[in-house]
Image: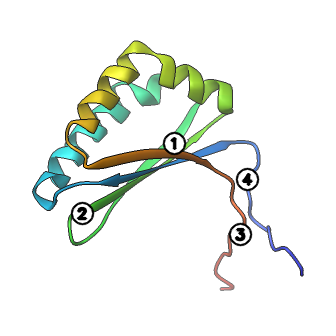
Amino acid sequence: MTQLRPYVRTDVLTVIVFIDVEPENQQAFIERVTAMITGFTRHQPGFVSSSIHASADGTRLLNYSQWRDREAFEAFRAHPDAERHIADLEGIAIRLEAKVMEPELIVASAA
């Protein structure tokens, strides 16, 4: 079987955070995670990018972030301010689960 990996960026670590919330808490979560990312996370060494995706029904969010390497991500997670922000977010979420993910396939438009 041929493996297609035409646009895979291998020089960064991808972390995906799966978040479940009550619909009435989705906007509050978005506001707090935005404050965390713009006020703290983006200034951490090795941070590359982050994006938040929200479900239309208000029950799910996904945070797709990229880091220079695992060491940079682990240093961020160990930072006392990160722990404080994450604890705040966990207080809003039903479930918050971070996973380091490897891209297997990225297909761009043929146009």
Q: Mark 4 points at which residue?
A: 9
Compared to residue 27, the image places residue 71 above or below, namely above
Q: Which of marks 2 and 1 is nearer the N terminus?
A: 1
Label 4 to label 1: alpha-carbon separation: 13 Å
Q: Which of marks 1 and 3 is nearer the N terminus?
A: 1
Between marks 3 and 2 in the image, the one whose residue lies nearer the viewer: 2
Q: Are marks 4 and 1 in contact (CB under 8 Å)?
A: no
Q: Mark 2 points at which residue?
A: 59
Element under disc 3 = loop
Residue 98 seen anywhere in this rendered image of the structure = yes
Give the amino acid type for the residue marked by disc 4 in the picture: Arg
Instruction: Using the image, tell me which numbered label, if any, was put on residue 49.
Output: 1
Picture coordinates of residue 45, whole percent (x, y) = 57, 22
Q: Residue at x 72, y 65 (%)?
A: 104
Q: How crowded is mark 3: few (under 14 residues within 10 Å), some or many (20 or more)?
A: few
Q: Residue at x 68, y 75 (%)?
A: 107
Q: Which of marks 4 and 1 is nearer the N terminus?
A: 4
Q: Mark 3 points at which residue?
A: 105
Label 4 to label 2: alpha-carbon separation: 30 Å
Q: Which of marks 3 and 2 is nearer the N terminus?
A: 2
